[in-house]
Image: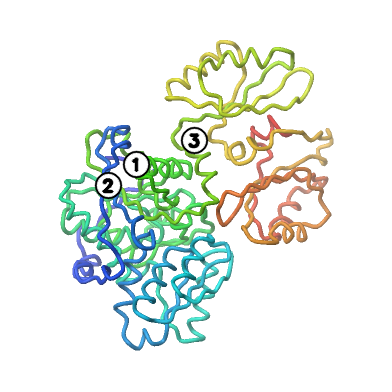
Amino acid sequence: MQFKLRQKIKKTGSFRYSKKYLKLIENAKVYDVAIDSPTTHAANLSFKEKNNIYLKREDLQPIFSFKNRGAYNKIANLSDKQKSQGIIAASAGNHAQGVALACKKLKIKCNIVMPITAAENKINAVKRLGAKLTLYGENLSEALIKANVLCKKNNYTFVHPFDDPYTIAGQGTIGKEILEDDINYDALFIPVGGGGLLAGVSAWIRQNKKNIKIIGVEVDDSACLTEALKSNKRVLLKKVGLFADGVAVSRVGKNNFDVIKECVDEVMTVTIDEVCAAVKDIFEDTRVLSEPSGAVALAGLKIAAKRLKNKNLLAISSGSNVNFQKLGYIVERSELGENREKILSIRIPESPGSFLKLSKVFGKLSVTEFNYRKSGDKDAYVLVGIRTSSEKSFVSLKKKLKKLKYKFSDYTNNKISNDHLRHMVGGRVNNSHDSTNFERIFNGEFPEKPGALFDFLKCFGNKWNISLFHYRNIGSAYGNILIGIEDHNKNKSLLIKHLSKCGTIFKEESNNKAYLDFLK
């Protein structure tokens, strides 16, 4: 079996690091707070993908995530002295709940540091479990730094979210349960953040049933394991995407990486759109709304299933602590992730009857959106969303457009189009022929926190004029921004240097064809 964007792992052939986990997993103390989660046969998805597809339902744990296993096993194995000192941890959500639940069960004081951008539902869950909560920083890295400061100051015992043998062993009990299903699985798909779940499950599976393929699945904007395997060492990502916050980790754990290299066959990456489509699939088969990170493994499984038939495939559905604010974005992008919605830019004559003539081309295809703005006396561009039943029907539409001599572009995978353009088709800037006076367009992100816009504009100042601004909240710790800036300077690096001082990472998109067609 070969998979999309895969990174094959040259296993060492020995179990130098992973062999110790057999005993640790066998003796793991998890069932005081965890259930032996059921395995669900995904009937709808199995029929659609022509394979036998199963979901390991960690979304049904008491904290709606597998994280209670590793957190409890680690804390339960601490010495009495370590417990008496109190526990501290840093997390964006699920590990925080796992630690808080363990400490409540064991009657231990704990302090959880969470970034101020953490989802409200996860913050409230930690509070209900009785933990002392400290909100600090805009991301997990900053929260971890704060937790380390508090740990040294107060002599707390630190509980790492993934890079610890007892945590890995706690997650590894899932592998033990999978083999107890008595289903002859051909392949297992496991989500990857810091690697604790993949390391624990693979350590048990590989040493007990060697013929099962084990595949780690990462989101392509936080693929720290893939990069580590390419470099044959752990690397620190400069930036990670936060939409799937449960797997948004910048560096794979050391203990985890050692085990993964011995026990895992390969790792593959998926897009956010593919993850959103997998959220929809889980809902249709279970009526449970998965969080994005909980659907990562299934997104990878679906890609693999396209090349397989009648295989027994299992994905770990790792959590359902979904942020309600993300639902709209998930629904919108699930169609793109399923490759069912296509976005086309079509040039039409600026004359009466043009719309009617174009609409006849679509026939009985479902039009999901239709955006138009007059741009001149001769031609106009229309941004059209089309829902297709198959790739074949889309190919047929493109042939029809070519035959009728329509000029068009496929913007289905154009980030500017998907994140911004389809929501803001409108006016245009009238650029001067003077090359020193024109609009430049940049794509970036803002942290979801009060005052973020004010802080940026205050730093940006009034030396340059903002000619376009579109901000989109996608229910994540960061929102997407599209900004147009009039630049009158001959030295074009001055604006780049100025933007870099404003705390937001921008990428210039001035030559993006979607922008040129509709907004320039």
Q: Position of residue 169 (x, y in %)?
A: 27, 67
For label 2, the SS is strand
Nearest the eye: 464 or 339: 339
Task: Indicate whether 394 appears above or below 12.
Answer: above
Q: Are marks 2 and 1 in contact (CB under 8 Å)?
A: yes
Question: Which residue, given by chain and number where applicable, does mark 2 sit on?
Answer: 40
- Binning the other alpha carbons within 10 Å of mark 1 as few (below 14), some (14 to 19) or many (20 upward) gives some
Q: Amino acid at mark 2?
A: Thr
Question: Which residue, given by chain and number where applicable, does mark 1 sit on?
Answer: 285
Q: Earlier in the sequence, mark 1 or mark 3?
A: 1
Q: Are marks 3 and 2 in contact (CB under 8 Å)?
A: no
Residue sitting at 20 percent across and 49 percent down?
Answer: 212
Give the numbered dot on residue 236.
Answer: none
Give the left or right position of residue 479, taking residue 128 as reference.
Answer: right
Q: Amino acid at mark 1?
A: Asp
Determine the CA span between mark 3 and mark 2: 26 Å
Determine the CA span between mark 2 and mark 1: 9 Å
Give the left or right position of residue 35, taking residue 489 as reference.
Answer: left
For label 1, the SS is helix
Determine the CA span between mark 1 and mark 3: 20 Å
Give the left or right position of residue 88, taking residue 313 as reference.
Answer: right
Nearest the eye: 217 or 101: 101
Q: Earlier in the sequence, mark 3 or mark 2?
A: 2
Q: Amino acid at mark 3?
A: Leu
Total labels: the figure holds 3
Quarter of the image for the C terminus: give it.
top right
Residue sitting at 79 percent across and 45 percent down?
Answer: 487
Coloring scheme used: rainbow
Give the numbered dot on residue 336.
Answer: 3
